[in-house]
Image: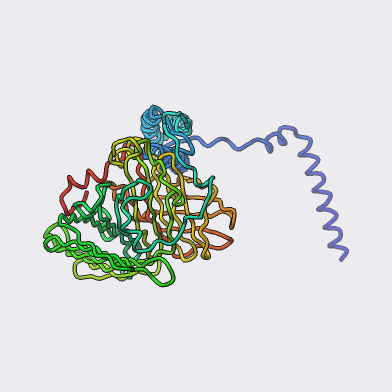
Amino acid sequence: MKKLSVIVVLLAIMSLLFASAYAAKPEAKADAQKAPAAIKLSKSNPNMTKVIEADIRETYENVLNKYKVAYYFWYDTFAEGEVPAANIVKADGIIKNAEKHIVKGAKDADIAAFNMANKLLAQADTLLNARVKSPDQFPYETDQPLIKQDKSKVYKAKSADYLVLDRYGVKMNDVGPSLWGYGDDGEFYFVMTFFNYHAKGGIIVPVVVEVMSTKDPEKRYIYLLNNETKVVQTADSVDYLVVDGQKSFHMFVKDVPEGGTTCTVEGSFPAYPGKAPAISFNLGTTPAFTYWYNQNMGAAMMYPNIVLAGFEQPGPAWGTITMGDKTAKLASNAGAVTEVCMISGAPGKPYTEYRQEMSQYGNEWYIAVHTDQVDAMFISYGKFRDSGIYYKGQYIIPTEYRLIPGIANQTITLIAKTKEFGDLKLSFEMKLHDPVYTERVATVSGTFDGQSLTNGGAWFEHCFKGSPDGIAAVQEYPQIVDPM
């Protein structure tokens, strides 16, 4: 024990002596406080080059996405104002120049090139963050149903409402359900149908049916049926049938005792060798509720020369789709929106094809949502904004909603404020896209009233400034469209 005590004492004395000696040498203290030498880029140090390149690439991808958000108007131009067109053009050139510097920095281990790329990306970012509002952007006034809320004329539509061809002086534009969802084969499906009226007072040709799937997402199978549609009405139903050679489409709408309707559609289309397999479907939907444009209080100004009325009906979907020799049954997340949309010329103005005005003014967002807990519609046509949410048997009109872009043309988030249950948050991930009609289908996740939403899906349309006039364009395409 004595030997151990002596050793401990000796070690303590030596430690004090060493510390005193070190403190007596200022140069040793200074050396200890020196920062490590900066690592210089060189071809002998490729890992550091990769680290710096990866960091700048992340900035590059973020700025490039901002450019695409601006270029494709993947944001709410009415709420935010527009990114000036000159800024978009200038940012494009700057981003391309920055990319060249990134390549040079990676190739030559050139820190100056990387620094220049960062500087250029900052310039592009500033340009793309700019928003400008002007009176010419949307030069008209319209209703504000989110602010002036009145649900006194809202009700679940019946089959007879499908045949009202003039509402508040607005004539029928189109009728038909669009459906989406996963099949039990793991593929996601998109089926769009509509009988066209185009403010003519009756169904006109062609009747249009379109089918897409993730089996081959670049293929759009469009069928134009050019024969007369037979319409038969009873006290509680309406039946539509059009047959054009081997092509046929049938829609049947029937009232249900609990209110509202059930809508079923059947389509049969032959194979086109080298272009399309035989396709058929038998699908149905029972809408959860009826969303009325402008709360069914009267016609709303859609664009300067166009007025709008009618209703949309989101809800669950079911049924089967056959492509070739394989049949898929829609899974539990399938949804649909049944459209009974009325559009015609504003009072005293000749009717202009509404897609032309969409292309001129943009900011069209048409979003139909179905989840296990919530069904909803969100509408933005230029300056007109409207919405209806159905939850726990209640028709809820949000006080406002906003769109938050994610990845351009792929993801976006919507947040709607409600007085009854707080914020409804919806995040959309696009699954299929028809670039001519600018129609999309998406999966949806989100929260509302303190719970997570399940089995979410959406029909999602976004017509931006300069987008194609889908109605005119489809007439110019073959009846079956091969990969675009």
Task: For residue 49, say whether it is visible.
Answer: no
- Residue depicted at 19% across the width and 59% down the height: 229
Which of the pair 213/137 is nearer the observer?
137
Which of the pair 201/60 is nearer the observer?
201
Locate residue 356: give its quadrant.
top left
Q: Is residue 29 left or right of residue 201?
A: right
- Residue depicted at 81% across the width and 44% down the height: 17
- Residue depicted at 86% across the width and 58% down the height: 6
Q: Position of residue 472 (x, y in %)?
A: 22, 43
- Residue depicted at 35% across the width and 63% down the height: 181
Q: Is residue 355 above or below residue 272?
A: above
Q: Is residue 199 left or right of residue 22?
A: left
* Residue lying farthest to the bottom in this orientation: 257
Q: Position of residue 218 (x, y in %)?
A: 25, 53
Indicate how the structure is coloured in the image: rainbow
Q: Is residue 66 above or below residue 197?
A: above
Q: Is residue 267 left or right of residue 69?
A: left
Q: Position of residue 334 (x, y in %)?
A: 37, 65
Locate residue 75: give its quadrant.
top left
Q: Is residue 222 left or right of residue 162?
A: left
Which of the pair 261/480 is nearer the observer?
261
Q: Position of residue 7 (x, y in %)?
A: 82, 58
* Quadrant position of the N terminus in the picture: bottom right
Q: How many marks?
A: 0
Task: For residue 255, say whether it is visible.
Answer: yes
